[in-house]
Amino acid sequence: MNTHRKASSLFVCGNAKNNLEEMCKCYPDNISIDENVPLDFARELCTKYGISLGGNIKLTVTMLLGDPIDNINGAKNCMQIGGKKGYILSPGCDMPYNTPVDNVKAITSVVHGEEVEFMEVKSHELSNLTKVHEIKGLEVEKFPAIIVNDEQISAGELPDINYLKSAIKWGSQLHE
């Protein structure tokens, strides 16, 4: 790849810690690691060989199952360990299919230095649920809890407005 003046990157799923130095000896432009490889260990090796490093936001625990604050903290932690030079913040592998969009936006807000603004917007949305979720007759003051797909959801945990509308429409079709 280097002889053709093309950038190259190596990635191995899982714990590639024992193979990382051999990967570095291939002299790619970048090595990206899974969440199973300690970022500080990979950073040290890649720096020794002059190779950039990418990774390793936790996929399931943080991106899929965590909330935006978990993702902000995870991204900040990776960026602190990875450093400002030669590090690319990225997921440890492919993002899970159902990763909440707000979690991805939270990570992006950290990269752009806007996590404070992101958190203020989310806080504002939660404090104004009657304005965020404008479905007639579904004002928060009238319903301390809502049942969606047989699950009770408190007002502070209301799902996305489009999901609510589709769940209500689907439920009404069942009773026609």
Image: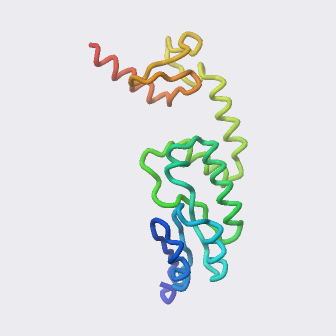
On the image, the x and y values in percent for residue 3 come to 50, 89
Q: Position of residue 108 (x, y in %)?
A: 61, 51
List the single residue furthest toward the front: 18
Q: Is residue 57 above or below residue 31?
A: above
Vertical order, 127 against 37 (above or below)? above
Q: Residue at x 63, y 71 (%)?
A: 41
- Could you say where residue 170 lies in the image, as x and y percent from the top left? 33, 23
Residue 13 in the figure: left or right of residue 126: left
Q: Is residue 21 above or below residue 43?
A: below
Seen from the viewer's position, the closer of residues 45 and 30 is: 45
The colour scheme used to paint the residues is rainbow
Name the residue rendered at 67%, 51% in the picture.
110
Between 163 and 13, the residue placed more toward the observer is 13
Name the residue nearer the viewer: 92 or 128. Answer: 92
- Name the residue at 36% across, 21% down: 169
Examine the rendered structure and indicate whether residue 124 appears above or below residue 91. above
